[in-house]
Amino acid sequence: DAGITQSPRHKVTETGTPVTLRCHQTENHRYMYWYRQDPGHGLRLIHYSYGVKDTDKGEVSDGYSVSRSKTEDFLLTLESATSSQTSVYFCAIRPGQERNSPLHFGNGTRLTVT
Amino acid sequence: DQQVKQNSPSLSVQEGRISILNCDYTNSMFDYFLWYKKYPAEGPTFLISISSIKDKNEDGRFTVFLNKSAKHLSLHIVPSQPGDSAVYFCAAPSGAGSYQLTFGKGTKLSVIP
């Protein structure tokens, strides 16, 4: 599992509530990513981080914020969850230094917003 | 605007036969491509990659072919096995510094015993 732990694995929440998903890595890799997977859309990048306190937006960042106060943890927050944010969320790390090195993914968090 | 396209949502193949999964891209600046495999309830796992300086890369039963002039790549699985049944994603490094990874929508492969 490349030393990646996502928590929680499943969550059901109500529209309008805040939600935070956690990604924890056991190694000090610089790059971390949050993706969402939806039927008909594949994997889409939400935000990524290239170091502590260094983050940038991805393709579908609206409605999401992230924080990285420690190398090992990358948090994804939905400030006010909406039904359109029902999805499976994957965290990934980049173990290699080269830009072409593959990403390694966690096993995902399934979020349902009712 | 999709930069990496997988136009076949699904593919069914008999066990032992060849599976061919296709991927097209629009950005001629892409110079590296990766294939990922995903089982239900698991994260995607890296399968094989190819650099644009090559037109073929092989790893066991898996071979990826790249046709730069057509902006097309394909993943061949020979022989296909039931355990190969999964969703396959094509991806390319993108964004500032190319440290992001842009994925296609995926193709669900079903290998029928």
Image: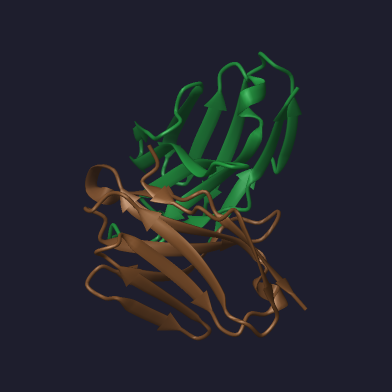
* Along the line of sight, the residue nearer the viewer: B96 or B91: B91
Q: Quadrant of the C terminus of chain B?
A: bottom right
* Along the line of sight, the residue nearer the viewer: A56 or B9: B9
Residue occupying image coordinates x 69% and y 34%: A111
How far from the left and from the top, in percent, is residue B33?
36, 62
Tell whether B28 sits left or right of B110.
Answer: left
Colour scheme of the rendered structure: by chain
Tell whether A98 sits left or right of A104.
Answer: left
* Along the line of sight, the residue nearer the viewer: A77 or B27: B27
Residue occupying image coordinates x 67% and y 16%: A17
* Along the line of sight, the residue nearer the viewer: B98 or B74: B74
Q: In this view, does B24 lie above or below B52?
A: above
How far from the left and from the top, in percent, is residue B18?
58, 80
How far from the left and from the top, in percent, is residue A46?
46, 35
How far from the left and from the top, in percent, is residue B72?
36, 62
Q: In which quarter of the image is the N terminus of chain B?
A: top left
**Residue B57 lies in quadrant:** bottom left
Residue extending farthest top: A16
Residue occupying image coordinates x 41% and y 63%: B34
The chain assigned the colour brown in the figure is B
Q: In this view, does B57 lie above or below A106?
A: below
For chain A, give the colour: green
Tell whether B85 sits left or right of A12.
Answer: left
Residue occupying image coordinates x 35% and y 50%: A30
